[in-house]
Image (cartoon, grey):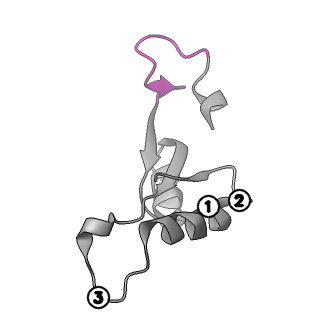
């Protein structure tokens, strides 16, 4: 997705009068922002930290691995460990 912002004029936050954003949400957010003129350059899955201590929560290591597998075929969604 970074090729969307390459060769941008200074300050580098717009492309063809669009505001570029990165999502930490769902693809529905991507569709909504696209329809409102935003240039979506990426999205992240961000698993909660082990310190959250939610009952039944598997370890962050495993949650990160699951997220990485889920994002493996996406050129849009990445994982923020």
Per the model, the C-alpha gap separating discs 3 and 1 is 23 Å
Q: Which residues are magenta?
A: 7-18
Whole-percent x, y for residue 25 in the image? 43, 61
Residue at 35%, 66% in the rendered image: 48
Instruction: Indicate yes or no whether the magenta region holds residue 55.
Output: no
Secondary structure of the residue carrying numbered label 3:
loop
Q: Residues within 10 Å of mark 1 (few under 14, many from 20)?
A: some
Q: Which of the labelled discs sits on residue 55, or is there none?
A: 3
Circles 3 and 2, Cβ within 8 Å, touching? The answer is: no
Please, which residue is most extreme toward the right here?
Answer: 73
Q: Which of the labelled discs sits on residue 72, or is there none?
A: 2
Give whichever of discs 3 and 1 has the lower sequence position: 3
Q: Residues within 10 Å of mark 2 (few under 14, many from 20)?
A: few
Secondary structure of the residue carrying numbered label 1:
helix
Circles 2 and 1, Cβ within 8 Å, touching? The answer is: yes
Residue at 36%, 89% in the rendered image: 56
Along the horizontal axis of the image, is 50 left or right of 66?
left
Magenta span dominant secondary structure? loop
- Of residues 22 and 34, which is closer to you in this image? 22
> Does residue 34 lie above or below 50 as drawn?
above
Per the model, the C-alpha gap separating discs 3 and 2 is 28 Å
């Amino acid at each position: 997705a970074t090729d969307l912002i390459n060769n941008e004029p200074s300050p580098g936050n717009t492309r063809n009068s669009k505001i570029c954003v990165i999502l930490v949400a769902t693809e529905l957010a991507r569709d909504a922002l696209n329809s409102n003129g935003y240039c979506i350059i990426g999205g992240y899955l961000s698993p909660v930290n082990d310190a959250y201590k939610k009952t039944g929560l598997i370890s962050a290591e495993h949650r990160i691995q699951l997220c990485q597998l889920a994002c493996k075929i996406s050129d849009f969604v990445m994982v923020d460990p």
